[in-house]
Amino acid sequence: MKLWISLLLVISNAFVFDAFGQPFPSRPIRLVVGFAPGGAADLVARTLQEPLQRNLGQPIVVDNRPGAGSSIAAEYVAKSPADGYTLLIASPSSILVNPLLSPANPFDPLRDLAPVSKVTSSPLVVAVNPALGVTSLRELVALAKKNPGKLNYASSGNGSAPHMAAVLFRRVADIDIVHVPFKGGAPAVQSVAAGDTQLSFATPPSVLPLVQAGRLRALAVTSRERTPLVPGVPGMAEAGLPNYELSFWYGFFVPAATPAEVTRRLYAATSEALRAPSVAPALARDGTEVSGSASPADFGAYLKREAPVWARLVKESGAKAE
């Protein structure tokens, strides 16, 4: 009898079951993206869609729910059944910044969502209009110091990662530049290319085609060192600001009450997906790289370390919800 009980325990531990007692997953999983199709989050989600389907044995349905800086998508997932069938891909803006912009909102991503794993990380690119006449970050800083309050930087919105990256730049470089928010990364970058604003901190996919076309000039990436993701562009230390470093990441989250064994199953499938041969090259084409977590708890600890960094930037920016 004891042998049979032990055997049953071994067999049951080999499977994860959902709330209905079925092996998890037993039906399609919804991967919610807080931005429109074609953006950076959507590209990462669709790159991981096929290997996740293969690892989990169920379809992954990408569900784009744009609006409110991705808060709509985050709250939707947080209020979904905590059964592992609704997964969120989110960035620092979604998890760490938006709650500070709208403190009256009862929804709190750090409380109402549970981390599964970080999946990607990438630097932003400091890009300027060539007509500005600067060819290096040092020249940009010198020009800004000579003309306080005269240079405008475009971002994808109040509280966005490009906005926070520029706030950190202002502090470290000790310069005064003016924020011009737009509703999305594409119009922000286009404003720099058109000369309506002078510079932007933007994701590689949004600026590199314009850099290659000669309509923008890339001065640096926001990582401390150079990265093969953006060839030929110096890191911040080489560009003259060794105390500057900021990375932009995406990660997976589930509703906070999701059973730990379900979260671990999603984590294992995600980790395996990130190792798929097709994933790293596809992400590199979009200027980002694989950056998984050692465990869901490891990702949670990372978020706790990151939270005060982003909180200080939000406070310095004076940003409010739009």
Image: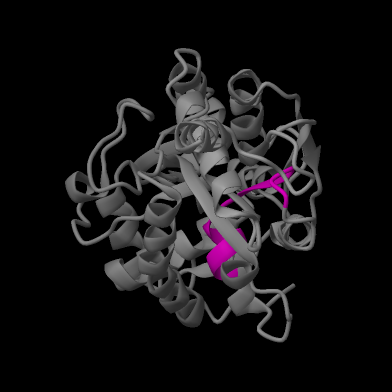
Q: Quadrant of residue 143?
A: bottom left
What residue is rendered at 65% in x and 68% in y? 112
Residue 192 counted in the magenta span: no
**How many numbered badges does the structure rendering display?**
0
Q: Which part of the image, by quadrant, shows the C terminus?
A: bottom right
Up/down of 167 relative to 240, above or below: below
Q: Quadrant of residue 32?
A: top right
Asked which colour scheme the image uses, the reply is one colour
Q: Quadrant of residue 73?
A: bottom right
The answer to whether one can see residue 160 in this image is no
Residue 87 counted in the magenta span: yes
Q: Nearer the viewer, residue 80 or 171?
A: 80
Q: Nearer the viewer, residue 37 or 185?
A: 37
Farthest bottom residue in view: 104
The answer to whether one can see residue 260 in this image is yes
Up/down of 19 relative to 303, above or below: above
Q: Position of residue 125 (x, y in %)?
A: 43, 43
Q: Nearer the viewer, residue 48 or 248?
A: 48
Farthest front residue in view: 1
What residue is rendered at 39% in x and 50% in y? 247
Q: Nearer the viewer, residue 76 or 27?
A: 27
Q: Position of residue 229 (x, y in %)?
A: 38, 28
What residue is rendered at 53% in x and 36% in y? 207
Q: Is residue 165 left or right of residue 30?
A: left
**Over which residues does the magenta segment extend?**
83-97
Q: Position of residue 254 (x, y in %)?
A: 64, 53
Q: Is residue 8 left or right of residue 185?
A: left
Q: Position of residue 161 (x, y in %)?
A: 52, 57
